[in-house]
Amino acid sequence: MFRKVLIEMAQTTFDLDDIKRRMAGAVQSFKSDLASLRSGRASSNMLDPIQVEAYGARTPLSQLATVSVPEPRLLSVQVWDRSMVQAVDKAIRESDLGLNPQTEGQVLRIRIPELNEQRRKEMVKVAHKYAEDSKVSVRHVRRDGIDVIKKLEKDGHITKDDVTRHTDQVQKATDQHIAEIDQALAAKEKEILHV
């Protein structure tokens, strides 16, 4: 029994659903990053991608503070631990978002300035960077899937026809998820440039 379990654990399996799930995760992460890019109005998820150097590790801002939108062009960040206020302020200032918080005790107030043409173009560049990073993630998942297929072929577990079929399935999933990234990017670019 124990030997059988070890053999099963040692075998590699091809799981297209897992590959698609991992690719979809990269797309979802990208869409979340896009949602954080402002288009002229304050949004509580604008600060979601910000990581703060806290307690010796990079920590998401959402684990250190509450973000609210008291006015359409104002964000309020209530930092829970007074000792983290400076670190949160620094992380927000150093982000690609171009925001300058004003500290009042444990609350950071962030005015959202009107987007000028130059800032809009900078935001589009950031969106393109997010898109490229997501495409790279999808391609890494594709590479992992192809590696599994090659290993299965090398070990004699699948035939040449299976290799071709599985490789095509992985490529179709890759193309589909990259197209989804491109569509989301085009929509966000239009929103930023034409608000």
Image: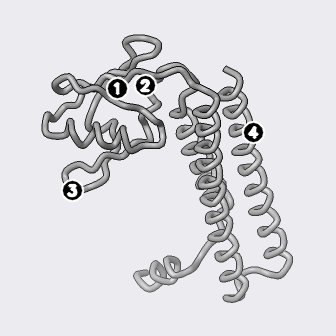
Q: Quadrant of residue 93?
A: top left
Q: Quadrant of residue 32?
A: top right
The CA span between labels 1 and 2 is 6 Å
**Left or right, residue 79 beside residue 35:** left
**Left or right, residue 177 beside residue 111:** right
The location of residue 68, given as percent across then percent down, is: 36, 20
Label 2 environment density (alpha carbons within 10 Å; few <14, some 14–19, many ≥20): some
Residue displayed at 75% across by 39% down: 183
Label 1 environment density (alpha carbons within 10 Å; few <14, some 14–19, many ≥20): many
**Left or right, residue 51 beside residue 173:** left
Badge 3 vs badge 1, beta-carbon distance below 8 Å: no
Task: Name which of mark 1 and mark 2 comes first in the sequence.
Answer: 2
Identity of the residue furthest to the left in this view? 83
Identity of the residue furthest to the top in this view? 71
Can you identify the residue that label 1 sits on? 67
Badge 4 vs badge 1, beta-carbon distance below 8 Å: no
Q: Is residue 170 above or below residue 12?
A: above
Q: Which mark is residue 32?
A: none
Badge 4 vs badge 3, beta-carbon distance below 8 Å: no
Label 3 environment density (alpha carbons within 10 Å; few <14, some 14–19, many ≥20): few
The CA span between labels 4 and 3 is 38 Å
Residue displayed at 68% across by 65% down: 142
Seen from the viewer's position, the closer of residues 170 and 68 is 68
The location of residue 130, given as percent across then percent down, is: 59, 48
Q: Which secondary structure, mark 3? A: loop
Badge 1 vs badge 2, beta-carbon distance below 8 Å: yes
Can you identify the residue that label 2 sits on? 44
The CA span between labels 4 and 2 is 24 Å
Amino acid under disc 1: Val
Amino acid under disc 3: Gly
Residue displayed at 36% across by 38% down: 92
